[in-house]
Image (spheres, coloured by chain):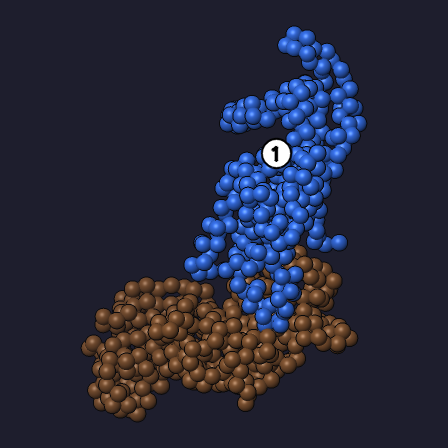
Chain colours: A brown, B blue
Amino acid sequence: MSRIELNNLAHQYAPGGDYALQPMQHVWEDGGAYALLGPSGCGKTTLLNIISGLVQPSEGKVMFGERDVTNLSPERRNIGQVFQFPVIYDTMTVFDNLAFPLRNRSMDEHYINQRVTHIATMLGLEDVLKRRANNLTADAKQKISLGRGLVREDVAAVLFDEPLTVIDPHLKWQLRRKLREVHEQLNLTLVYVTHDQTEALTFADKVVVMLAGQVLQVGTPQALFERPEHTFVGYFIGSPGMNFMACSVEGNEAVVGDERIAVDPAMAEAARLAGGDLQLGIRPELIRPAAADETGHLIKVDKVEDLGDYVLVTGHLGEHEVHVRLDESEKIDSDGLRVVFPVDNALLYADDKLVG
Amino acid sequence: MEKREYQWAWLMVLPVVLVVAFSAIMPLMTVVNYSLQDIFGPNSRFFVGTAWFTEVLRDPALHGALIRQLLFSAAVLLIQIPLGVGLALCLPKKGPWVSVSLVLLALPLLVPWNVVGTIWQVFSRPDVGFAGVILNGIGFDYNYTGDSLDAWLTVLVMDVWHWTSLVILLCYAGLQAIPDAFYQAARIDGASRWAVFRFIELPKLKGVLLIAVLLRFIFSFRIYAEPFVLTGGGPGNATTFLSQSLTTMAVGQFDLGPAAAFSLIYFLIILLFSYVFYLTILNMDREG
């Protein structure tokens, strides 16, 4: 096990073509549970395949600890990878499937027996070890794929490429919890690619958000929620995403149309220095209704949806559409909703990047 | 209401039933009819029961042809299936050479069967044929018209040239259908090239191999035109296979009764073997 470092890494599939991955510098700490989150086609899988060695990067280096593995083949890299669709060896039993990576490396049969039994017990596969793998359900098959990644003790990391795509929703949750357990027991570095924010946020200690071959932000789920460093992160994470409104800054206030919204003085200063297109961003959850003695801002209500445990209000502040998430108990006046944008939660973005 | 629907359904199937009746059932029943009678002319025929079947089954010449036929089909399967799988694995997976190789491979399949025989007859002639002259030039005493073994080998090589492409094309299609993730997982698992073949490619080729084995068995078991043109069944009767014996009997000697009985037995053998192959391959890796 070791930390994995990507040194000035970039990738073009064809020389002179578009960058599938923009040049990046990134470290995966040993034993971390990471999620790689982004829309389809943003380069998540390419990045994953570069770490596992299935793709050779056109620029930069991949380091496992102190070792440069950029030119090593996947089989010599000590890495596990689980794919979108379960990959199992149809003609083998579950036991033989799990033992396959060890047998290929000529391990001792006694050790193999012990190790496979251990991993199978951990994944809840101990009862089907003697059965043929191709007769099992999709989630059991995906567990086998996962088991093949975990069975080698020397793996530097296990990589997951949207592993729950073909799994039924109620089993997804179980498998994800299994992964967390595995992570806690084995203390392995796990990298989990997904385009589903719920999966990413529930699985990972740290989430890496990517867009168009670029890493936009690396942070804890909480940081991504509270301080998105890029408008895309704000928009992509959350349900619904962050509200963004074009604004200008005057003094310690953001001016949105006719409304003046107070922001953090340091942030206002930074925004003035940064220049460019300024936007005010705030989470729908963090906007609160104005108390009786507060002026607040009037939002013209277009639509109120009751979504079970909360109410989603869609309205307009001037010409900007704004979403507000409120408690069910909140009373909503149909012609307008007075709200407060708390100073700490109103963030300023210059050219899509968080200022300050 | 339901009854009306049922009648309509029957009408829909009727054209197929008619076509199958004319193309398969009626000719087959005609043969069954012939096989039970001794026919001298349009108006003079006698019912003979199973006499023709007994005679045909006891005919030593036909036993010889059957054994040669079985040997030939066995050799064809043992050579062409492994060779076809092997060559399919060697073909490029993508790029401009894919279409070039596929077209070249398809060429032998497009040649009419009797032309295949003619090509090889000329090609192998010891006096003027390219292969025959070269073989004799480098010291082999090769003459397919005089030597039984030479004749056999020539017929076999001709069949391999003619039909291996079919196996290659089927296997190639099967290989192309295997998702990349399987190969990637195998690389990460550290699998050898042999293990990739044994545990990924071969199991995934099961379906196309079933088709390939069945087609190659059926085609080789009823081979007629190519050896007939190449060797005429000789030297002696070294390369006389079942279909040629049958033709000689039915058209040459006009023994319609025995020929009909022979045809039915021939048909049943093919049916039986195909069924056995089908079951064997299908059950090859069921859970025990």
Residue A122 shows in the view: no
From the top left corner, tell me how far across and down residue B124 is, in percent.
58, 44
View extreme (left): residue: A258
Q: Is residue B139 above or below residue A289?
A: above
Q: Seen in the image, is A56 located left or right of residue A118?
A: left
From the top left corner, tell me how far across and down residue B143 is, in percent.
64, 43
* Residue type highlighted by circle 1: Phe
Q: Is residue A29 above or below residue B270?
A: below
Residue A59 shows in the view: yes
Could you say which is closer to the camera, residue B136 or residue A80? B136
Q: What residue sits right under mark 1 in the picture?
A: B228
Q: Is residue B1 above or below residue A16?
A: above
Which residue is pictured at 54% across the width and 72% down the height? A160
Q: Seen in the image, is B232 located left or right of residue A271?
A: right
Which residue is pictured at 63% across the width and 69% down the height? B191
Which residue is pictured at 64% across the width and 38% down the height? B145
